[in-house]
Image (cartoon, helix red, strand yellow):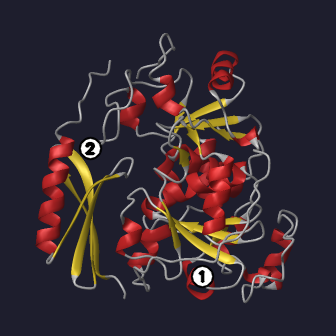
């Protein structure tokens, strides 16, 4: 099988830039979300449609990002 | 390899004791003959996606996927590739340390790898953890390890074949060499380097981690008590070494990147990040693509330094 409908895009979520990568393998869509800097994957989900996979991954990502604290830098 | 490229390559290529026994993978064409790859100091540590597509199944070659996302391999991988899990298979799961020698020998043996196998590593996120595996394989003295330039990202973007079969291999016997600790830095050496300014300290984390604005990459658990960086360290984020398609930047671009921060070959370099994996990527770039002789990866990194009682911290 070959990956189909492969897309990578960036957007802001909860104040952070993230990368959303989605592709279809067989009958399943896979979505992976990574922070832009340094690029670590921290949420993923799959689904029967692109929208479902991305929605589920974004929900997880938002939850995890809410736990990232920012400290003042002098 | 075209004769026009040989002049540049011959002085720097290490010997290949099994030059002719890698099945169809003739040594003269091990990188895929990309002009871009040939410009690096040690170009034979990289292969192209084209080369992997043609040679992944060759006798004497084993392709291995190592991802940040440990579920990615099961979704689909290069046909015939093995998959290693960095959280369980490339570390000591009891003591904080790299993979113990006996565990590595067992892992390689059941992956069908012996001491003469050409190991081609690739992974997600610009080969982040492929570089981590590369560094450990070099510590244990494996002769021929290569990285697929662009990694999983490029393979997917090119729409290449994947399968999700769990590959199995005939077990082989692997005997690791004594660990080469000349490429690994431990805390006392880093403390001395900071105090005496005897090495360039390169912090490859993001600028926000470097300044202490955040304690871990966004979305990941915090793993240190204090933010900031080792005094005197230069911040050169690891991913600056890569193009958008995941491939490594050219020799000239990489040299300019490190030159601009005063990180040059005439002084030892110690790279660090949070847990030592991003910095293994930078170690690979400095050691093999730019040809620095004395470069070490400090795998204790910020999760060690940033948790030490009394350790000096610089902010921002």
Using the numbered discs, state the Cα–Cα distance from disc 2 to disc 1 in whole angstroms.
Answer: 35 Å
Label 2 sits on residue: B219
Whether the residues at callouts 2 and 1 have beta carbons within 8 Å, the answer is: no
Residue B154 vertical placement versus B28 (above, below): above
Residue B264 visible in the current orientation: no
Which class describes the residues within 10 Å of circle 2: few (<14), some (14-19), or many (20+)? many
Residue B6 placement: quadrant? bottom right
- Comparing B303 with B88, the one in front is B88
Residue drawn where x is 59% and y is 38% of the image: B271
Q: Is residue B33 visible?
A: yes
What chain letter is assigned to the residue under label 1?
B
Position of residue B42 in the picture relative to residue A56 (left or right): right
Q: Nearer the viewer, residue A71 or A51?
A: A51
* Residue name at image x 38 percent, y 33 percent: B209
Location of residue A74 by image quarter: top left
In the figure, residue B265 lies in which quadrant?
Answer: top right
Badge 2: chain ID: B
Considering only vertical position in the picture, is B5 above or below A55?
below
Mark 1: secondary structure: loop
Q: Quadrant of the N terminus of chain A?
A: bottom left
| Image vertical order of residue B311 relative to residue A63, above or below | above
Q: Which mark is residue B56?
A: 1
Give the label, 2 or 1, closer to the camera. 1
């Amino acid at each position: 099988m070959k990956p189909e409908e492969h897309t990578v895009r960036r957007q802001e979520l909860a104040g952070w830039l993230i990368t959303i990568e989605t592709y279809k393998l067989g009958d399943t869509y896979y979505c992976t979300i990574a922070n832009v800097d340094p690029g670590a994957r921290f949420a993923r989900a799959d689904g029967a449609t692109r929208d479902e996979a991305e929605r589920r991954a974004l929900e997880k990502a938002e939850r995890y990002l809410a736990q990232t604290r920012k400290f003042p830098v002098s | 390899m075209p004769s026009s490229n040989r002049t540049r390559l011959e002085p720097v290529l290490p010997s290949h004791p099994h030059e002719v026994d890698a099945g169809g993978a003739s040594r003269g064409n091990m990188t895929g003959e990309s002009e871009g790859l040939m410009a690096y100091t040690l170009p034979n540590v990289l292969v192209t996606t084209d080369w992997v597509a043609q040679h992944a199944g060759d006798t004497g070659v084993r392709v291995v996927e190592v991802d940040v996302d440990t579920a990615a391999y099961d979704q689909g991988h290069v046909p015939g590739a093995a998959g290693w899990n960095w959280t369980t298979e490339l570390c000591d799961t009891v003591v904080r340390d790299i993979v113990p020698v006996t565990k590595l020998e067992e892992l390689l043996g059941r992956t069908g790898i012996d001491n003469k196998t050409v190991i081609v590593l690739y992974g997600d996120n610009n080969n982040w953890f492929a570089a981590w595996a590369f560094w450990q394989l070099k510590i244990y003295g494996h002769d021929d390890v290569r990285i697929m330039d662009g990694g999983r990202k490029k393979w997917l973007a090119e729409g290449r074949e994947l399968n999700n079969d769990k590959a199995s291999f005939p077990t082989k016997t692997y005997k690791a060499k004594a660990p080469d600790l000349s490429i690994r830095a431990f805390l006392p050496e880093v403390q001395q380097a900071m105090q005496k300014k005897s090495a360039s300290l390169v912090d490859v984390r993001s600028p926000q981690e470097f300044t202490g604005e955040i304690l871990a990459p966004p979305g990941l658990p915090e793993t240190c008590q204090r933010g900031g960086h080792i005094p005197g360290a230069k911040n050169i984020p690891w991913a600056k070494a890569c193009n958008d398609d995941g491939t490594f930047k050219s020799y000239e671009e990489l040299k300019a990147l490190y030159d601009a921060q005063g990180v040059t070959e005439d002084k030892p370099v110690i790279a660090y990040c949070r847990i030592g994996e991003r910095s293994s990527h930078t170690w690979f770039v400095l050691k093999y693509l730019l040809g620095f002789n004395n470069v070490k990866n400090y795998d204790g990194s910020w999760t060690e330094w940033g948790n030490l009682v009394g350790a000096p911290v610089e902010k921002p």
